[in-house]
Image (cartoon, grey):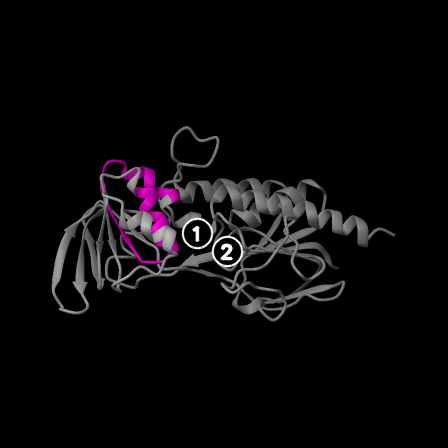
Amino acid sequence: MEKDIIIIGGGPAGLTAAIYAARAGLNIILIEKMFSGGQIATTDSLENYPGFAEPINGVDFSMALDAQTRSFGVEIINEEVVDYHLTGPIKKVTTTGGVYTGYTVILATGANPRLLGVPGEDKYRGKGVSYCATCDGSFYRDKTVAVIGGGDTACEEAQYLSKICKKVYMVHRRDELRAAHVIAQRVLTNPKVQIIWDSVIDKVEGQATVTDMQVRNKLTGETQKIDVDGFFVAVGVIPNTANIKNNIKLNDGGYVVTDSHMATNVLGVYAAGDMRNTPLRQVVTACADGAIAAESAREYLNEHMSS
């Protein structure tokens, strides 16, 4: 029997979509290859989600959202999607465990930050290593931090952090910034930002949290240890859209293109959260996307499936 909605992804966007769809009385299934929560489950502390006077651990937040979703009777299956067939009135999703069919699909597979791949990065993730200044910058108020990268995002992160932190180092592997001129100029003229040119990170070190980084000049080979309290990686984000590119329209960055109703170019298919073309990738915006996608799918079902 076909499901009304097949939701792919168990992060905040997918789980919120499931809650809204289940409360509307729809027959749904949610497929998540690992564990509920997505990227938020790797965050040590979530401080900017409305309604929490005190920061909440990312795992605790994820577990609460998972429990709330299951309380509405949502079926969550832990399998990996290996193929999609999304055109036509009946959508088919093939996983490592079987084949599922439905009238609509909500894609909420998220995105992953591009990693540096240096020693200490994984060990201190959530303990000084971050991939989002908007998410975690306030934890480093009046402290010293580093931003790694030289594009638009890195410059915007450095500029944002300079308003909070005592000092911002910016480590860039080239001798000029890749960011748009206006964005780059703000950083170049910011007295709180010190750019370390032609350099890469060899390792991140710490104790309970990050304490310093080892920086190497690519031209001279000279290394130096710089004390930092926080370490922000801004070298790109990779949307989890590789296995849907033959079905769904993506932009140049690989993100799913949607309208304001979360609708893709394929009728009956919606996308929500970090994997779509959105100006802000936060838990609160992912949840909002999920709610909109569920409501759009419900309206589609009412219009196309009514007898």
**Residue 207 location (% of width, % of height):** 18, 48
Magenta stretch holds residue 149: yes
Q: Is residue 236 positioned above or below 261 on the image?
A: below
| Pick the front one: 144 or 26 | 144
With 97 as the anchor, is 253 left or right in this view?
A: left
**Which residue appears at 26% of the width and 39% of the height?**
165
Q: Amino acid at mark 2?
A: Gly
Task: Quickly name the residue at label 2.
Answer: 110
Magenta highlight range: 134-161
Magenta stretch holds residue 194: no
Task: Tell me whether the residue at label 2 lies in contact with that at label 1, contact meaning CB atoms closer than 8 angstroms.
Answer: yes
| Extreme residue toward the right, this view | 307
**Which residue appears at 39% of the width and 56% of the height?**
180
Quarter of the image with the N terminus is bottom right
Q: How many marks?
A: 2
Residue 81's quadrant in the figure? Answer: bottom right
Residue 292's quadrant in the figure? Answer: top right
Q: Is residue 96 in sight in this rendering?
A: no
| Label annotation for residue 57 | none
**Residue 149 location (% of width, % of height):** 31, 58
**Residue 140 location (% of width, % of height):** 27, 39
Judged from the image, the secondary structure of the residue bearing numbered disc 1 is helix
Task: Quickly name the residue at label 1.
Answer: 39
**Residue 248 location (% of width, % of height):** 62, 65
Q: Tag 1 or tag 2, which sits nearer the N-term?
A: 1
Q: Amino acid at mark 1?
A: Gln
Report the magenta stretch's main SS. helix
